[in-house]
Image (cartoon, rainbow, N blue to C red):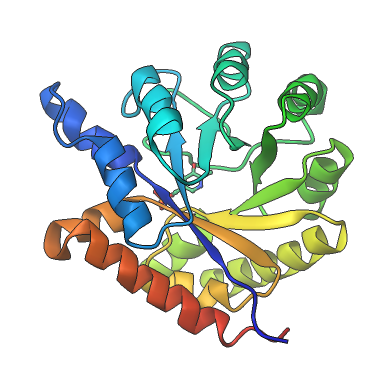
Amino acid sequence: MPASHLRLGVNIDHVATIRNARGGRHPDPVRAARLAIEAGADGITAHLREDRRHISDADIERLKAEIAKPLNLEMAATDEMVAIALRTKPHAACLVPERRAERTTEGGLDAVGGRVELQPKIAALRNAGIRVSLFIAADRAQIEQAAALGAPVVEIHTGAWCHALANGHASAADAEWRRIREGAALAKGLGLEVHAGHGLDYASAKTIAALPEIAELNIGHFLVGEAVFVGFAATIKTMRDSMDRGRAKAAL
Ligand code: PXP
């Protein structure tokens, strides 16, 4: 069987980070989203944080109105964010943990500890036709809880694996990789669609693309950073190529 297409969701948060450094309109994350789609992105991901440090409410409205591919809204599971999602109706909502002091989304969502609060929010989003995913670590209990909560998708947090790879911690990277592989297989076996993201670069995206269970990667920081050197479109095309080469090795 030919390997299935692995979707690339391009996260444009850090285009907004650069814009906000000067408080003006440039660079425009919506323009970056359009360019990303032209260069091969299958969807656009944006995280509307509680403190609005990068993406703004107006960006989300414009992304929904102006881009031609699915919008994946990353959001904390709060009443405020659920209300925004229900109003905006993105294609998808990815529920993430959020702590004000963190620099990025540092850990996965605790679906087990938070199940009572998560359940009505997942139901409300699903009832509005929004595809819900939970951004979780590749742990058995979290994955099983995501399935029990009726989330159709899990996004596996690849941050610890990527961090270990980038810092040359080979045995930690191996252990994380095993956890990701086993988690992806478990989630798929439970009928969940499996996504992955955080900290991915060309090499790690190529490696993880070989896991046939994974349907989508969401990648942001590396793409925006690399764009400084070679341009956003070229970066996305190279990422697409890395993912395709990795996926060609998937044993289906
Ligand atoms: N997926 C989720 C759920 C995230 O929160 C993030 C970071 O915003 C990403 C993917 C992308 O991570 P990175 O910017 O490190 O590629």
Pick the quarter of the image with the N terminus: bottom right
* Left or right position of 174 against 121: left
Residue pictured at 65% horizontal, 46% vertical: 136
Residue pictured at 69% horizontal, 57% vertical: 194
Q: Position of residue 160 (x, y in %)?
A: 51, 57
Between 140 and 195, the one nearer to me in the picture: 195
Q: Can residue 168 be seen?
A: no
Relative to 235, residue 123 above or below:
above
Pick the quarter of the image with the C terminus: bottom right
Residue pictured at 39% horizontal, 77% vertical: 241
Q: Quadrant of residue 94?
A: top right
* Left or right position of 159 against 146: left
Relative to 234, residue 198 above or below:
above
Q: Can residue 231 be seen?
A: yes
* Left or right position of 167 against 224: right
Q: Position of residue 149 (x, y in %)?
A: 84, 35
Between 123 and 130, the one nearer to me in the picture: 130
Relative to 164, residue 38 above or below:
above
Residue pictured at 68% horizontal, 75% vertical: 212
